Amino acid sequence: MDRLMLYRLIYALAARDGRDRDLFGPHASRGVEAFACSAPGAGFPELWFELPLTGNPWFDLHVLTARADLSAGNVPAPEACGRYPAVFDWFAGAENGRQLALSWDLNAGDGKPAAAIQLLLFKRDDRTACDFLKAAGRPEAAPAYRAFLSRMPEDWFACYLGVFPSRPGHFLRVECIPTDQLQRAYALDPSLLARHLSQVGFAPLSDSLLSACQALASAPLQLEFQFDVDEKGAAGATLGASVRFSVGDNTSGRMQPFRNADAAGALLEQLEKQGLADGRWRRLEETAFAQRLTFGSESCLLFCAPVFIKLRWRAGRPLDTKAYLMAGVQKQIR
């Protein structure tokens, strides 16, 4: 089946019944253009739709390619990989790389290369991470990455790192996941969280920020932190804190699907009362679907589901709240 057609169908199903107006905004055509420039692999990539929960509706698109879908030595055309062929050529042979992500700022709409390129890791692997930075044209970020890891609490896992090659100067983003045990400790003792955020260099730590992070840690959902790391390996002034929902089998007992009537809705209702989100979050549950598509001898399952809620602060003040939908294609038969 044609991948561009599948993308169009996924978007149409997620955004139908007025959700394009309420959640996605006016950039559907830019999303198609971005997807067409982001799928160099053999299979259908994983999609993430990033949606704000305040202000005007819009969406950004993140397209994730698995290493198994690339062939070593087969360098993709620049127009098929966000104009970063060297990174995808390197990634095809990277043993510990899980996925390579291209992120598109659809609001800019300026036709430039993908705004960001990110590496998702199976496990901590400093050499692979630094090789990625070199392939992405930012080898000077490697010392900062290593310095940040040396600051990081022992029970955090740096699950991905990313760079923004089109932005001038240093720019390194790192996402971290605390262990379940440590997350429970944060829920009980926000002073421990304050010490760990200070340990990686993040400041200022306002009471409202710590209270919101404690609420996230208290939810029966997986907590993650995102940092913009400076040249010396310290966290910058922007902090992202997110919780992840389940999209498949719940084997841990801590994660669950997004439902307005469950922990997800309770959390977002609390954020709405605090002025950190508006009422559009109630439409997120409607974006979830799993639909079989058959065309001649081919068959596949299209799916979409809300997976993340992320809050951000800058200089200790709330910056924005976003939802992330994960979508893709399963069980494709050729």
Image: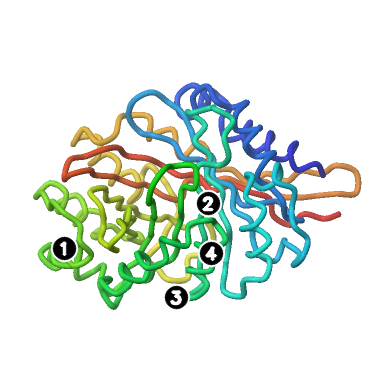
User: Which element type, helix, strand or loop, lies under badge 1?
Assistant: helix
Q: Give whichever of discs 4 and 3 has the lower sequence position.
A: 3
Question: What's the amino acid at mark 2?
Answer: Ile
Cα distance in 3D space between marks 3 and 2: 18 Å
Q: Amino acid at mark 1?
A: Ser
Among the two numbered marks 1 and 4 on one chain, the one whose residue lies closer to the N terminus: 4
Q: From the viewer's perspective, tell me whether residue 194 is left or right of residue 1.
A: left
Instruction: Give the residue number, with chain letter if any, for mark 4.
Output: 132
Q: Residues within 10 Å of mark 1 (few under 14, many from 20)?
A: some
Where is residue 5 shown, x and y percent of the image?
75, 36
Badge 2 element: strand
**Residue at horizontal 23%, vertical 65%?**
200
Neighbour tally class for label 3: few under 14, some 14-19, many 20 plus, Cα within 10 Å: some
The one of 265 and 142 positioned closer to us in this rendering = 142
Q: CA distance from mark 1 to mark 3?
A: 22 Å
Q: Which mark is residue 124?
A: 3
Q: Is residue 166 above or below residue 117?
A: above
Q: Looking at the image, is 20 positioned above or below residue 190?
A: above
Say which label, 2 or 4, has the lower sequence index: 2
Q: What residue sits 30% from the left and 53% below the top?
A: 241
Instruction: Find the residue positioned furthest to the right.
Output: 297
Residue located beneath label 2 in the image = 117
- Which of the numbered marks, if any, corresponds to residue 198? 1
Give the CA separation, mark 1 to mark 4: 27 Å
